[in-house]
Amino acid sequence: MKVEQISIFIENKSGRLAEVSGILGQAGVNIRALSLADTSDFGILRLIVNDTEKALSILRDHNFTVSKTEVIGVEVPDTPGGLSSILQILDQNNVNVEYMYAFVERSGDNAVIIFRFDHVDEAISALTRNGVKILKGEQLTKI
Amino acid sequence: MIWNDEFETLPREAIESLQLKRLQQTVERVYATVPFYRESFRQAGISPADIKSLSDLQRLPFTLKQDMRDNYPYGLFAVPLEQIVRIHASSGTTGKPTVVGYTRRDIETWTELMARSFVAAGAHKGDVIHNAYGYGLFTGGLGAHYGAERLGASVIPMSGGNTKKQLMIMQDFGSTVLTCTPSYSLFLAEVAAEEGIDIRNLKLKVGILGAEPWSEKMRQEIEDKLNIKAIDIYGLSEILGPGVAIECIEAQNGLHIWEDHFIPEIIDPETGKVLPIGEKGELVITTISKEGIPLIRYRTRDITRLIQEPCICGRTHARIERLSGRSDDMLIIRGVNVFPSQIESVLFNIEGVEPHYQLIVEREGNLDTLEVQVEVNEQTFSDEIKILQELAGKIKKDIKDLLGVTCKVRLVEPKSITRSEGKAKRVIDNRIKES
């Protein structure tokens, strides 16, 4: 159920994003989804890629600080109120969203949202109980 | 104008014979009363009777700041505590401060030397002296205060802080002389501008500025912005406090060091050898009139050179050139002494943080700023912004708690701090460049 995400510490300096994407591109790693959280001094680049271990090792080789985090990919109806219905389920089950971002591609008729929760297992069970489809890692990278 | 014509204009031979007499007395006294000196003289194989000329001073061992810490608090005092009428301590550093004690006669000497210094800076009876040096354990406030009273000037004991009130009093009381740190004088000018006060047109005519390093460029800025003469004053609590040396307003070129009370030497900080007059090196001072805590060959770590050429003001005492740095890695940030090793100890105590850091010191606007850059590693890295911000906040708080200095903490990528010859460059002090 869980998907592996890579997080990379990046200083707010010009060219750093280009460098990361260049390193991954040369290594043949494909970026499937990404989000950038930033402060005035630094940012955290979060990526879902087709080969997590390869991406981690190549970035470490280039002196980047990286970590692996478990997130989940959720299918969200691509209609008005679609996201709201998911968030309500989570709220009712007291699961907090640490952050979330949208996947670029759709899964069939649905949008895909990547979530990081404080309590991942509770989130998964609440969502599946309510008939929400959670995508597996290999499904996500094949979209 | 000269406060003490007799002593401030002594011919060189007379200064030197007075120095020798007082040096011999001081050496005898510390040998007899301070176990630390008795032991260090014995180790150097020298006794008071060996001091027959001023050049014999070079045979005596140095006194280090660490020696004062090791003998905390009263171990280097040369008189019983009941003869000490005042105790001060050094600012800001970690652990135990360095403690100094003054006898009644020491306070008298200090007062006299501060009065001389005020007059050298162009102040006189009738001036309103706005003393914004901190009052307290720090020597600045009280040292300047008693000298100003001795002069017969009217002293306003402002102490530091509360800048708007300082400006109000400056306007309403007609302050003519300002005593504070150079950076604070510029800060006053900045706040005055914000408040719509034309500080250039107040009655201020002189600023007597010290307790932190500053450049010639900064002097010009202060003189322009405040429309005053900015005079450099030098002192350190170990030796006396403010008033060890001061520029004269006539030349504003080098600080006269009161040679009837101190013997300055310039040494090579690496070898400890005394350098010829005029060469640049570390300033070493021996006190020759102090009773409470006389110091033999105290290493100030300040880099300067000695100027013995006569000065246009008529004073015969040698001058030290404006300080150009330190022989150790101590930084003075907003008046607080900071050693990189202290920052390192803070980082070392935070779990996961590696001591890969760099200190960037700037003078932004008019105040010193310290930025501590710390490399993030996989142990401290978190996928969540708030956890990284908490880490930065903790480092900042721990530094503030230990050193009393507010800094900005910037987390940086690993290996981004320049390493030269395998060793990181710890300090980038951009304040020095401006001169």
Image (cartoon, coloured by chain):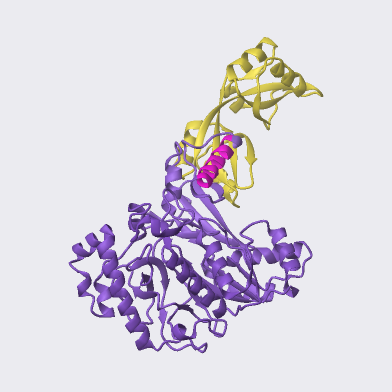
Chain colours: A yellow, B purple
Write down the quadrant of residue B185 in the picture: bottom right
> What's the residue at 51%, 31% (across, down)?
A68
Residue B192 lies, in percent from the top left, at 73, 64
The N terminus of chain B sits in image quarter: bottom right
The stretch in magenta equals B387-401
Up-down relation of residue B385 to residue B128 (above or below):
above
A114 vs B255, left or right, is right
Residue B329 lies, in percent from the top left, at 42, 60
Decide which of A59, B158 is in the foreground and name it.
B158
Residue B154 lies, in percent from the top left, at 65, 70
Write down the quadrant of residue B65 in the picture: bottom left
Write down the quadrant of residue B16 in the picture: bottom left
Residue B275 in view in this figure: no
Up-down relation of residue A130 to residue A83 (above or below):
above
Tally of numbered discs: 0
B398 vs B294, left or right, is right
The C terminus of chain B sits in image quarter: bottom right
Decide which of A73, B340 is in the foreground and name it.
B340
> What's the residue at 38%, 68% (across, down)?
B290
Residue B388 in view in this figure: yes
Q: Is residue B232 magenta?
A: no
B8 vs A75, left or right, is left
> What's the residue at 45%, 59% (across, down)?
B85
Decide which of B419, B345 is in the foreground and name it.
B345
Looking at the magenta stretch, what is its main secondary structure? helix
